[in-house]
Image: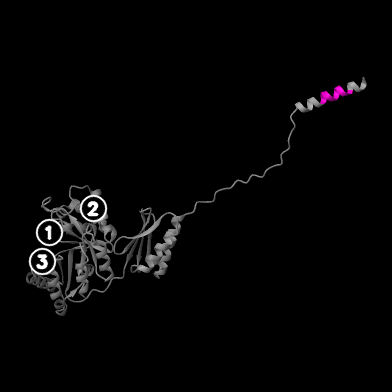
Amino acid sequence: MVLSGFAVISLVLLARMQEEPQTVVVPPVSVVISTPGPPIDYASKVHAEIEKLFASLDVETRDVQRDLGHEPARYTIESEFPSPELIAGFQERLKRIPGDYAVRLREMNSLIVVQNRQPQIIIHFIPTVPEVPDGPLLTIIMDDLGRSTYTAEVLLSMSQQVTFSILPDEPKAVQVAEMAHAAGREVMLHAPMEPQGYPAVNPGTEALFVKYSDAEIRSRFDRLLARIPYVSGSNNHMGSRFTEDARALAPVMESLQEKGLFFIDSRTTGRSKVSEVAHRYGVPTMDRDVFLDNVAEVDAIVREIRRLEGRARRQGLAIGICHPYPETLEALRRELPGLVERGITIVPVSTLLQKQSLDQGS
């Protein structure tokens, strides 16, 4: 009986052990919580590359104005424009920075850094001012360029400095601007503007009209400027209605003033307000003196070139505007060497404006 009782007790204890849960001891696990580091400031890397570009131009710190609080940020630097090789290297370094950065040419003396095609930084170069030649100065502006490269090739075959004014919506506009710049010729935007005879006289779908708001005029004009590389200024294509409206001209002059560009009044109306509004905004400006080819005949154009020469001798400087007619090209080929021989210096518009500024300051 004792053995039987012990067996019963053993069975009871065994059953209770099976019912009670057993505690499992788990060794401690080390948990590593990763703390994210500070975000990488890619914009600062872009600014560092800009400073490297300046260093490659051998520019001293005091020659750089940094306005980084603007939107977009701005640098203004007293230096010649970088060579194509330096710009290409700068572009390549920007491509290595995450964020889809790129560099675009804005005007003749400006670069713009874009991110996802949105302007982030504008770099404006102020070149060394060349000396103004002595004696009478004359500028000839060839309007309406960009339809083909032929006229550009003819003009570039002449040694005299004819200025190129390019219509922004022409198929060869960019190529002509690049050809002119590579040959050291000055490039202008020939900005289409509303004429009195509209719609019978049509300046094109991209023209500026007085019916637009100030914001719309500014936006459209900025887009026109952005289409043509290397521009140093603008003049009006048509525009007899637009240039009479001071309110409409104001956004144009505001844009030019911010970019350091000039405006030449083609004088398609005697009631133009260009000079008045340009002076209000501090935009360098002059009026056209003579249209050379209102009569598209070689002899008639030669007479107008001689008349322009007389203006230059009396005034010290003068501007003639012409168009890419075969007769005009022949008259220029015939007359320009003679002008130089007679002591007339043919200069870009910017040199003429510099002489005007010196004369007014004296």
Q: Horizontal and vertical percent for residue 196?
A: 11, 52
Instruction: State which tag comes first along the sequence, 3 or 1.
Output: 1
Q: Main secondary structure of the magenta part?
A: helix
Quadrant, the N terminus: top right
Numbered tag placed on residue 283 in the rendering: none
Label 2: element kind: helix
Identify the residue shown where x is 40% and y is 64%.
90
Q: Residue furthest bottom?
A: 341
Residue at (89%, 21%) from the top-left corner?
A: 5
Residue 232, percent from left and from top: 26, 64
Q: Nearer the observer, disc 3 or disc 1?
A: 3
User: Would you say residue 261 is visible in this rendering?
Assistant: no
Q: Which residue, given by chain and number where applicable, does mark 2 sit on?
A: 251
Q: Amino acid at mark 2?
A: Pro
**Residue type at the position of mark 3:** Asp
> Which range of residues does the magenta coloring cover?
6-13
Vertically, is 313 above or below 208? below
